[in-house]
Amino acid sequence: MSNGAWLPVFQDPSQVFPSIQYQALLTAVACILFYDYLLTLKDEIALIWNSPRSLGKIFFLMIRYGFVVDMALILLYNLQITPTSGPALTAKSCQALYRTAAVIQLVGFASVSAFVAIRIAALWSHSLPLGTILFLLGLLNPSTIIPLSGFKIGMINAPWPMAACIQNVTEENIWFLPLLETDFPIASSAVSIAYEFLCLTLTVSKTFGAYKLQKNTGMRTSFSKLLLRDGSLYFVVLAALGIFNVAASSLPESPLPVDISVILGRTCVPVLTSRFILNLRRTNQPCSSVESFLVDAGNSTLLLDFNSLEAAAAIGLGNLPN
């Protein structure tokens, strides 16, 4: 499209403002992601790079760097600070960049879903059916479903001040927009909210049981500290994102962008999950005082060391395979 063909769009503030708003929000969450990466790089080098190969290490690297590359690509095909900034993109390159970022993002969220499913399944006697259900439910969220719309609608390049690449809405695919803007976000967010609360319930119930046992032994770890250790905050934040997304999609004339949950999810999920795994690795470092006690866990008796990865897993994370 020539710049003249965009004139009607530029004369309509309702068309231009959402694009500028999206770029500003995207820049803000990208800064958070990259800043958190720099903050935790020292811990990553000490706790991940120098550790032996394990499933937890693989999950960490896939989630950490998958989302960093994903965000870099998103900025590349969206951000236009000035009329001459950024690369000269075509409709074909926009589509290629979008699909590449979408695939990387899907792999990242699948890794997060697998990590959560494995740890909770391990917590519940290594239940394979429970882990499978949680893994599949974890994939049914706005952050994985909405980006797939680009494969259906397609992308075209746009001039400043619009985003560099935008969805190519035509008469053939305009019927898909109501599904994308309302139905898909609300339905997937409802599943995501239920999923997060299910994970939270499953985790907290085991944490409370461990808290009562360790209290009876005279240990002084508070219940709130155990909740933070087992990742309960992770599920609360993501459930709040789902509720936020339902509000953005269902409220009439909402000022919030439809895919705000997707934007925030691309930052909150990798930041929380990466810090989660780093915290587990940190608890595995040697400590001068080691508190241990025996817990009868169904058919087996576990020796829990609260300064080890296994202890944190048994309290609220499940035992991650090495």
Image (spheres, helix red, strand yellow):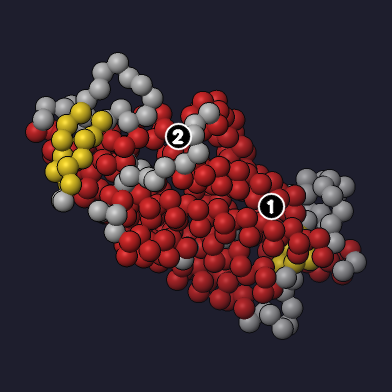
Q: Give the quarter of the image for residue 279.
A: top left
Q: Position of residue 204 (x, y in %)?
A: 25, 48
Q: In the rendered structure, which amino acid carries the disc numbered 1?
A: Ile
Disc 2: which residue: 278
Say above or below: 46 vs 251: above
Q: SS class of the residue under badge 1? A: helix
Q: SS class of the residue under badge 2? A: helix
Which quarter of the figure is the C terminus placed in? top left
Marks 2,1: beta carbons within 8 A: no
Say above or below: 250 vs 20: below
Q: Which is nearer the eye, 77 or 20?
A: 77
Which quarter of the figure is the N terminus placed in? bottom right
Say whether residue 247 is visible.
no
Disc 1: which residue: 74
Q: Which is nearer the eye, 224 or 19?
A: 224
Of label 2 and label 1, which has the lower sequence position?
Answer: 1
Q: CA distance from mark 2 to mark 1?
A: 26 Å
Q: Position of residue 23 (x, y in %)?
A: 68, 51
Q: Position of residue 275 (x, y in %)?
A: 46, 37
Which class describes the residues within 10 Å of circle 1: few (<14), some (14-19), or many (20+)?
many
Seen in the image, is 47 located left or right of residue 218?
Answer: right
Q: Give the quarter of the image for residue 286.
A: top left
Seen in the image, is 267 located left or right of residue 82?
Answer: left
Q: Which is nearer the eye, 49 or 160?
A: 49
Q: Position of residue 259 (x, y in %)?
A: 57, 60
Q: Which is nearer the eye, 85 or 238?
A: 238
Q: In the rendered structure, which amino acid carries the disc numbered 2?
A: Leu
